[in-house]
């Protein structure tokens, strides 16, 4: 598995601050791990995670039903926290089509069977998408209303390679315009930090409007951001991005939901799922401790490479 050990001389001094009075729930996306969906769930449970994000492709490849996955996760003590993704739905010419609404309803069917109440909506990447935040907000309001009628919620995330919406402030502007209680902001450390962006100003966003936070680190590479994201993410502390500062800003804004790992990494997906899940769990424990003013000593990982504070 890929990792990057940064020497102590390169580490910034972190001012101790207590942000948490209790540990947060810890989650991992099934896309992070190798194997079948049952094998991924077992590895997540054995590593001590509280919950999982179910990636749609994993569910589609499972020969059983979503209800079976719900029972399996429950038997393992895992909560299904997020279903993902809904793609390319907002700001298309002509508005949200009946076909897109029907497609969303089928995903909502799966969510109800899985027992999960939150879905991720990625910012549109289609070339035909309009640079029209008002239209995007209108479309997402319609989608959120359809979700709310079924007791579900949607989190809107700015993809770093989105056609027009690439930064979290743009996503929040659209969520604010939509003004629907079932639509909130989704934050991803990679999508923010890969663009050199920060969370400056996040403290103006009501904490209850931040629906979910995904975490990943990455080495600095000279690649287009999509390729970089899809193949070279790693766990917090194993790369070069300032994930500690990102997490501090999230917690400083009042977020107290799950911390979830969403890591696309070819080496991770080629390795047995349990050691990868265990590395991921350790990385979150380390990140939470350092973010909360704990010791800066790097945490050991299975491959013998340290997690470095950033």
Image: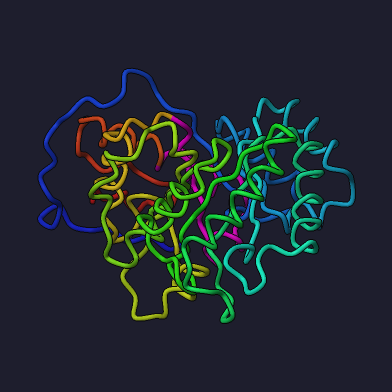
Give me the residue at 59% from left, 63% from top. Answer: 90
For image coordinates 49% across by 38% down, the residue present is: 211
Residue positioned most to the right: 64
Residue 157, percent from left and from top: 49, 55
In this view, the residue farthest toward the top is: 21
Classify residue 89 as left or right of residue 166: right
Residue 260 in magenta? yes
In this orientation, which residue lies closer to the viewer: 278 or 28? 28
What residue is shown at x 45% (from left), y 38% (from top)? 259
Q: Is residue 236 visible?
A: yes
* Rendered location of residue 271, percent (x, y): 59, 58
Label count reads 0
Residue 244: x and y in percent read 27, 45
Image quadrant in which you'd find residue 39: top right
Q: Height in image: 117 above or below 53?
A: above
Residue at the location (43% across, 67% down)? 160
Q: Nearer the viewer, residue 209 or 72?
A: 209
Q: Position of residue 223 (x, y in %)?
A: 39, 80
Which scheme is used to colour this image of the protein?
Answer: rainbow
Relative placement, left or right, of 46 versus 288 is right
Q: Is residue 279 visible?
A: no
Magenta extent: 257-283
């Amino acid at each position: 598995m890929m990792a990057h050990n940064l020497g102590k001389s390169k580490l910034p001094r972190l001012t101790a601050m207590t942000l948490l009075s209790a540990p947060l729930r810890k989650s991992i996306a099934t896309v992070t791990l190798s194997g079948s969906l049952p094998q991924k769930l077992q590895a997540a449970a054995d590593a001590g995670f509280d919950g999982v994000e179910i990636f749609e492709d994993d569910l589609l490849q499972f020969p059983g039903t979503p209800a079976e996955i719900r029972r399996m996760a429950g038997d393992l003590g895992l909560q299904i926290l997020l279903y993902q993704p809904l793609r390319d739905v907002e700001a298309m010419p002509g508005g949200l089509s009946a076909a897109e609404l029907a497609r969303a309803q089928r995903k909502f069917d799966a969510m109800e069977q899985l027992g999960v109440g939150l879905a991720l909506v990625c910012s549109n990447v289609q070339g035909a998408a309009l640079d029209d935040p008002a239209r995007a907000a209108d479309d997402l309001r319609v989608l959120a209303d359809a979700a709310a009628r079924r007791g579900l919620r949607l989190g809107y995330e700015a993809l770093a390679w989105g056609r027009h919406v690439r930064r979290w402030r743009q996503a929040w502007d659209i969520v604010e315009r939509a003004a629907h209680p079932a639509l909130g902001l989704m934050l991803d450390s990679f999508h923010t930090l890969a663009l050199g962006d920060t969370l400056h100003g996040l403290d103006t966003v009501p904490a209850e409007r931040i629906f979910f936070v995904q975490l990943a680190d990455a080495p600095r590479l000279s690649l287009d951001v999509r390729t970089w994201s899809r193949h070279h993410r790693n766990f917090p502390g194993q790369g070069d991005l300032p994930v500690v500062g990102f997490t501090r800003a999230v917690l400083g804004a009042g977020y107290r939901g799950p911390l979830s790992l969403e890591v696309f990494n070819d080496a991770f997906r080629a390795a047995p799922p349990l050691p990868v899940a265990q590395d991921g769990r350790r990385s979150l424990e380390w990140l939470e401790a350092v973010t909360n003013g704990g010791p800066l000593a790097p945490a050991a990982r299975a491959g013998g490479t340290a997690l470095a504070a950033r």
